[in-house]
Amino acid sequence: MADYKGIKGFTIQTIAGDPPAPLIGQVWYNTTSNVLKGYSTNAGAWASGGALNNGCNQNVGFGTQTAGLSATGNITGGNSSTVSEEYNGSAWTQGNTLSDARYGAGGDGSQTAAIIFGGFKQVGGVPSGAQTETEIYNGLTWTEVNALPAARNDTQGAGTTTAAICFGGHPIPAMPANTVSWNGTSWSAANDMQGGTAFAAAFGTQTAALTAGGGPNFPGIDTTEIYNGTTWTEVGDLNTGRTKLAGSGTTTAGIVFGGATSPFPGGGAIALTEQYNGTAWTEIADLATARGNLASASASPSTLSMAMAGNSDNSPSLDTVTEEWSGAPTSTKTFTDS
């Protein structure tokens, strides 16, 4: 038998004013102003941040918008870099160098506890190929620890210095789907991805990671996979497939941005940003500078995400650009009959 709520539904709250701490999606009738109101999110936006001291692309980003870290990268002549820089929310400062030069590495962590692994090494114009080296940063120095079981570059990573995963990448032409897990001391095999990829966006933790897009061929793919610490599951696709993109956040609240759908320079770099809510992707505000091969920093897309360096169509080799994501602020809205 149907009850009253099933027949009539729920009534909208009536209040003399606005609630002191409304929830997103909450609706009420303000009897003081005699209007219907609700609480919702607004569109976020990208803003310019401090420029890196050393232009590069295919670097790795760590940390947050007020305590960020950039390490390695592809520099002049296609050479690999050992440079790291730290960000305080407004400016970058040169940090200590890594033991191993590389670009296209994987990694994750914070400004004072970061892990980086794999990558491609080329010094003095002489390539050494994909690498296995793993290094850990303690906020002051980089220390080499146990290597990956197999060399790979253009790989993805998520987690911390004591609990991380490495997945995807290649040596060319293969794109391994295999995943390896880091326990703070050594790497071990974990379950494979549904499909191998390289140049993808990745973020999260060892037990809740997300990867989206990638390639390596243009225009890139739109596939998204989520890892629960045991298995990978394919979920909702990106609206725009792309490769050489970056991202940040969690498996229920993340963003991806930038990338490329055709070779660049020449118009291939894109500025598109998409936001993930745990189910589907929605296109939101664009980067100010369209670019691919960029890095990202942050575990939270709401107020802390940051995009750094990369390749734009105007500056294909040595970008120093940093942009900061303001997130999606909330506000009270008044509903009208229009």
Image (cartoon, grey):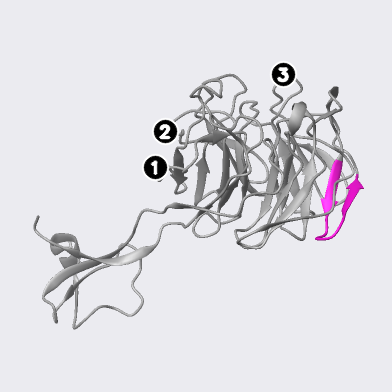
In this rendering, the answer to whether 22 lies above or below 129 is: below
- Could you say whether the residue bearing mark 3 is in a helix, strand or loop? loop
Q: Residue at x 69, y 23 (%)?
A: 175
Residue 16 in the image, given as x and y percentages of width and height: 18, 83
- For the question of whether residue 2 can be seen, the reply is yes
In this rendering, the answer to whether 13 lies above or below 100 is: below
Marking on residue 174: 3
Pointer 2 or 1: first along the chain: 2
Looking at the image, residue 212 sits to the left or right of residue 43; the answer is right
Q: Which residues are magenta?
A: 134-145
| Amino acid type assigned to the residue bearing label 3 in the image | Ala
Give neighbour class at mark 3: few <14, some 14-19, many 20+ (Cα, 10 Å). some
Q: CA distance from mark 1 to mark 3?
A: 31 Å
Identify residue for label 1. 282
- For the question of whether residue 11 can be seen, the reply is no
Identify residue for label 2. 239
Q: Is residue 143 magenta?
A: yes
Nearest to the observer: residue 229 or residue 182: 182
- Could you say whether the residue bearing mark 2 is in a helix, strand or loop? loop
